[in-house]
Image: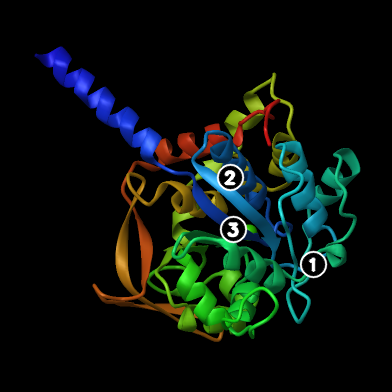
Amino acid sequence: MKRLNLLFLFLILSLKTVAQQPVPLILDTDIGPDYDDVGAMAVLHALADRGEVRPLAVISCNKHELVVPTIDVLNTWFGRPNLPTGAPKGPGVTDGAWQKWPEMLVAKYPHRIRSTAEAPDAVATYRQILARQPDRSVTIVTIGFLTNLADLLESKPDQFSKLTGRQLVEKKVKHLVSMAGLFPKGREFNVYKDSLAAERAFNQWPTPVILSGFEIGREVKTGPRLLADATLQSPVKDVFALCMPKAKEDRNGRMSWDQTAVLVAIRGAAPYYTLRRGRMTVNGGTNGWQDDPGGPHAYLVEAMPVAQVTEVIEKLMMHPKTAKAK
Ligand SMILES: [Ca+2]
């Protein structure tokens, strides 16, 4: 009887796996100032190889010249060199990495895009992709500034869609997951670096928003397992090997803000986190919070022990290059 129950359980679980479609997802990253974005892109590609996510684009919200080349290095390494990209063409943040790891990556690894300026307009890339996707299907995850999303919301009808940006997002985007803010209140990098964009994006976003606050990723320190794997060769490992020894606070691993947002965007908050519903307010780069069971936003609250979440994320970051990646 027990065995029968187990078999049914396996059947149900396997059916569930077959029925689950990969999450269509756009990643928006500032990859440069901090190297957690590198870990986050590794998580994206690892879960794509497992069939859990279908990446539609990796877009830059940072105008620094090495950002799109860095995205290209990682997409190429993981076997997806043709993923669409884009970068802000109007005002935006230009910010590089003090440890010079993007310089190391573009010197060592193959890529085709030589400068962020060569990439198409981020808003055009968003509009072109969203217009072609089924309604309410797309997950957007931001692990940088909200520059592109604010511009997207305020974009006008064009050759890709007769809808305004806000209408297009409302029709096509299931939800937005953002590494942004500090809860219940505080001042966090992705919000204050382009605070006007953060205000415009979060105040107007028409579908649910899940926020991974500073306090979530701060506790998740990844890197030591990655460096201890002597057989692994990857640009992700190279970046952590270069950067971790350069800062005292990274000695036990780098804080992993962006990886938490990508993990939740693909797998959902449970079992890692629970959600607290309400509304984030942004004013002059500082955020506040109002609890509201019917609010448009929710922030993550720890559920699984941090050590377990850390292991899940770090193992995904150790994903090897796959021979048959698309
Ligand atoms: Ca980031």
Quadrant in the rendering for residue 279: bottom left
Quadrant in the rendering for residue 110: top right
Q: What is the crowding at mark 2: few (fewer than 14 residues within 10 Å), some, or many (at least 20)?
A: many
Q: Amino acid at mark 1?
A: Pro
Q: What residue did someone put label 3 on?
A: 26
Q: What is the crowding at mark 3: few (fewer than 14 residues within 10 Å), some, or many (at least 20)?
A: many
Q: Residue 309, position in %: x, y?
A: 43, 40
Whether the residue under disc 1 has CB within 8 Å of ligand 1 = no
Label 1 SS: loop
Q: Residue 245, position in %: x, y?
A: 72, 40
Q: What residue did someone put label 1 on?
A: 120
Q: Amino acid at mark 3?
A: Ile
At horizontal 69% and vertical 61% (from top left) the residue drawn is 59
* In the image: residue 119, left or right of residue 306: right
Q: Earlier in the sequence, mark 3 or mark 1?
A: 3
Quarter of the figure with the C terminus: top right
- Examine the rendered structure and indicate whether residue 295 appears above or below residue 230: below
Q: Amino acid at mark 2?
A: Leu
